Image (cartoon, coloured by chain):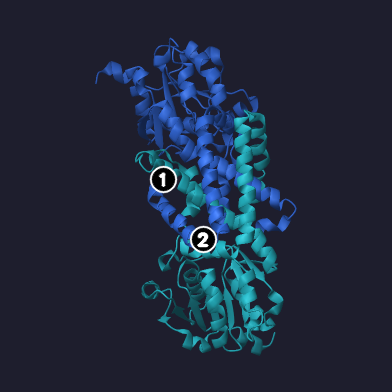
Chain colours: A cyan, B blue
């Protein structure tokens, strides 16, 4: 490794577009890793920028005109906005800048910049990390430590810029998985998007039923809290995800509804041996969940 | 308060029927509160008794013939077994013994001992506490601290025995809520039983889809883990609960399925404004979950 290459990897000017949970958490960790770097924040919500500044998440507010000086640009906004913003960011950045997003869908986002002249500056990224909270106040240190980071279409990103991004992800403690965007969107519909709908509709069912029974929620325990937790998530973030990944999510939702109906039919038929079997087979999830943090 | 009453409340011989998570956790805390007491274990699984003994959860194995010396009997077994065991326990205990169960259903259990000559020795209890684990190894200290304990038909339990049980629950750090068995079973279908089915069927949907995709579960994050956590629960415990609370659970499941279908139809109709609204309304769950541990 030459001195020149080391120099190229130095991270100086970081731009965070979307200063909420995901972008803000990247900023906090990168600032800890690179105390000399400067973090610029771009956000459509001025109050978020003020908050991010007050919390020390960003060092300075910025706008698109300043992007030419960026070494790293992280786009962490709703996925519908990413479709519009990503090409505009690529229009502005220098040849040495690495731009990545953190969106929960990859097919449409990769498609929108497929023929962009600066496509090589972009890396399609989905860090499997987050909480049900949102906004700058939700940003936390070490959010990405030991988490999986899915990278799509790595081969069309400039090699030196890949290297810069991978070094950063490695420093953040992430493990990397490579997938194509189509496979990513299909599988993530099952292991992430479906969980959110399941939690939202569980929350809705209970709220609708119990709205006039003020004391009932005293009966809710940690099991309910865990199962419904994702129903606290931001609709502004999740509605565009369901829209972009509609075909896969509807397929997953169909299978989920069919499984619930089948379970109900077993109960109606008084077939509790089979109810038992359904649950016992699914206990296998224990093995799968081992190691998920 | 007289010396006599104080003496009556002293806890000496505790019988735990079912030495798993729920019974074992009661034993651990009661032993810490009353170092002089002796905990007897009864279990149909000999290996569980050995394990409970080795873990210091119980002091001695016992059988039903020894129940006449019990001060407190805790029944923490599957709810179908409780229907059979509870009357047999009441047949054996002395007039001064308090017997309570910890089952997740209350209507059938209260009904089965309605005319039992020792009905006054029984308190119908549902502690809203637990984890997705089971067996003696799953028993933990302080499981009941700050948790809700639902008591049904308190008025038909002998006053002095109520007092003994309530003192114990208070010492364990629990808050008490009184309900009738019918209301308990109806509401618990929504805030607990439905969550379990939702989690089990989510687990099944993902396992069925991804069984041949070994690497896919690297894509699963903490959100999935949280939503599907209850699918680790014991089928031996849960199948009888769904059976006993069938009518209420089927009603809740119907409403859940209808809500999921409606969400899917909104997606199919490309009505993402309404998808957004559905989620935003459900965000109200944040307020409800405050204070649930």
Residue that appears at 62% across and 82% down: A121
Q: From where the camera sits, is residue A225 visible?
A: no
Counting from the top left corner in percent of width and height, residue B8 is at 34, 18
- Near mark 1 (Cα within 10 A), the count class, few <14, some 14-19 or many ≥20, is some
Give residue B242's mark.
none
**Real-space CA distance between mark 1 and mark 2, rounded to the nearest whole angstrom:** 34 Å
Q: Chain of mark 2?
A: B
Left or right: B77 with respect to A274?
Answer: left
Counting from the top left corner in percent of width and height, residue B175 is at 36, 36
Residue beneath disc 1: B292
Residue that appears at 42% across and 54% down: B281
| Residue A93 higher or lower than B13, as above or below | below
Q: Quick one: B7 or A65, which is closer to the camera?
A: A65
Residue beneath disc 2: B271
**Tag count:** 2
Q: Most extreme residue toward the top, as rendered? A: B117
Counting from the top left corner in percent of width and height, residue B80 is at 56, 24
> Residue A269's quadrant in the figure?
top right
Q: Quick one: B106 or B272, which is closer to the camera?
A: B272
Left or right: A154 with respect to A224?
Answer: right
Left or right: A42 with respect to B5?
Answer: right
Q: Quick one: A24 or B172, which is closer to the camera?
A: A24
């Amino acid at each position: 490794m030459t001195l020149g290459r080391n120099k190229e990897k130095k991270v100086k000017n970081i731009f965070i577009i979307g200063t909420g949970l995901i972008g803000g958490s990247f900023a906090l960790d990168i600032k800890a890793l690179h105390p000399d770097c400067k973090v610029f924040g771009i956000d459509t919500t001025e109050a978020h920028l003020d908050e991010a500044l007050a919390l020390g998440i960003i060092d300075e507010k910025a706008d698109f005109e300043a992007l030419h000086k960026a070494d790293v640009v992280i786009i962490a906004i709703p996925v519908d906005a990413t479709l519009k913003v990503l090409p505009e960011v690529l229009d502005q950045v220098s040849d040495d800048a690495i731009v990545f997003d953190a969106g929960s869908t990859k097919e449409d986002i990769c498609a929108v910049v497929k023929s962009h002249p600066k496509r090589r500056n972009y890396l399609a990224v989905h860090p499997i990390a987050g909480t049900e909270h949102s906004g700058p106040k939700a940003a936390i240190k070490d959010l990405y430590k030991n988490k999986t980071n899915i990278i799509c279409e790595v081969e069309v990103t400039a090699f030196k810029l890949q290297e810069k991004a991978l070094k950063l992800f490695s420093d953040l403690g992430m493990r990397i998985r490579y997938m194509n965007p189509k496979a990513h969107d299909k599988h993530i519909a099952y292991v992430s998007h479906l969980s959110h709908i399941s939690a939202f509709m569980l929350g809705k069912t209970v709220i609708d039923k119990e709205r006039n029974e003020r004391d009932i929620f005293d009966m809710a325990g940690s099991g309910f809290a865990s199962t419904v937790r994702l129903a606290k998530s931001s609709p502004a973030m999740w509605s565009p995800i369901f829209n972009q990944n509609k075909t896969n999510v509807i397929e997953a939702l169909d299978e989920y509804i069919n499984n619930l109906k089948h379970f109900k039919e077993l109960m109606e038929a008084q077939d509790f041996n089979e109810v038992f079997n359904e649950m016992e087979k699914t206990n296998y999830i224990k093995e799968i969940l081992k190691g998920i943090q």
